[in-house]
Structure formats: structure tokens, C-alpha cells
Amino acid sequence: MPGIVDADAHPAPARVESPEHWIKLFGQAFAAGSFASVARLAALTHPGYRAVQPQAPDALGPEGMLDFFARVYALVPDLRGEVVEANVYDGGVYVDVRLGGTIGGRPVSWVACDRFWFEDGLVKGRVTYFDPLPLFGAVAMRPRSWRRWWQSGLGFPTRKVSGSVDPRFSTT
């Protein structure tokens, strides 16, 4: 019987102590390679959070953040990330992350740069910069991934993630 993934099993801290602290938390979440690890970051998301990313609608608030990453993990369930470089600037941080996983049974990887800023110890916003062509190419060239891509709802802001692939629900 499906159940909601318990993101509170290992709760995140109540606040982001510094940009360096965020880099550590972000790196740990993506290195773990699971939606549940990334979902724990929502506890550190400001209610006014806004994220902008290529080929997807803006993510608003903690629920928008969770919905966006549910779509991504629905397409690439084994997604992992490694922080390549990070730079602190006044009020925020830039994080270069190498992301990878499998689509249609074959590996895919890309590099993204995320710019984060903070307010009251919470992540207020994120802008992601990356070339979406490796993802588009992986889906286009792997017909067995087409159904999963459609079910993920990526690229279709009015479509919801199909319950059969939504990582917010487990099958155990």
C-alpha cells in the first residue's frame, strides 16, 4: 500500500546558519541520491520562496519546491549530485553541481549552477542555470523513457506528476 515518504525521518536543521552551511546541506542532500533527502531541504525553504529553472514553471513556496523535485525524480529516480564548486557572495551562494542518473536505462549527466539567497535563516529563492539539451537528448533518443517523461509532468506546467512515478509516494 503506498504511503507518503517520511521526510521527517532525519529532520533538517531549523535554519540555515550561513551560506557555507547551506552548501554542506545541499551537497549532502544531492549526494544521497534520493528524493527524500532533497525533500528535507523544504524545511529550510521560506514561505515566499521562488525558484526559476529552464523548461519548467517557477516553483513557489516549499510545496512548489517539492513539486518541482518530485517531477525531476520521477524522470530520473536515481538522480545524484556532487558539488563541484561553490562561491559565497553578499547575501547568497552560487553552487555548481554535477548531476547524473539514468534515463531509459542509460546514464545521463549535466552540470547546473544554482544561485541561492536567504532571508531570516531560510532559502528565499533559487535561480538555476543549465543547458537542458543533455536531458532532452536522453529522452528523445531513448523511446523506453518516453512514458516516464510524460508521467513526470516535466515541461507541462498544467500536468501533475502521475501517482505511479511520483517519488513522494512509496510502493512499500
Image (cartoon, rainbow, N blue to C red):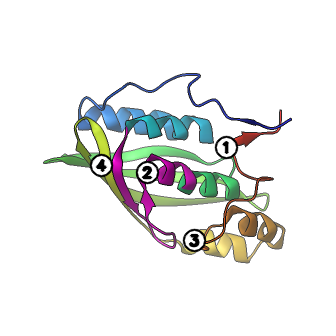
| Quadrant into which the C terminus falls | top right
Mark 4 highlights which residue? 124
Residue 17 vertical placement versus 145 (above, below): above
Task: Tell me if residue 39 can be seen.
Answer: yes
Element class at badge 2: strand
Q: Amino acid at mark 2?
A: Val
Q: Mark 4 to mark 2: distance in Å? A: 19 Å
Mark 1 highlights which residue? 168
Q: Are marks 1 and 4 in contact (CB under 8 Å)?
A: no
**What's drawn in magenta, residue-wise?**
45-67
Disc with the residue nearer the chain's start (4 vs 2): 2
Using the image as rendered, state which of residue 148 and residue 46 is in the foreground.
Answer: 46
Element class at badge 4: strand
Crowding at label 3, few (<14), some or many (≥20) Cα neighbours within 10 Å? few
Q: Mark 1 to mark 4: distance in Å? A: 23 Å
Disc with the residue nearer the chain's start (3 vs 1): 3
In the drawing, does residue 48 fall left or right of residue 140? left
Q: Amino acid at mark 1?
A: Arg
Find out whether residue 116 is within the magenta segment: no
Using the image as rendered, state which of residue 91 and residue 31 is in the foreground.
Answer: 91
Q: Position of residue 121 (x, y in %)?
A: 25, 35
Q: Mark 3 to mark 4: distance in Å? A: 22 Å
Residue at horizontal 68 percent and vertical 46 percent from the top: 78
| Quadrant into which the N terminus falls | top right
Closer to us: mark 4 or mark 2? Answer: 4
Mark 2 highlights which residue? 97
Q: Amino acid at mark 3?
A: Pro
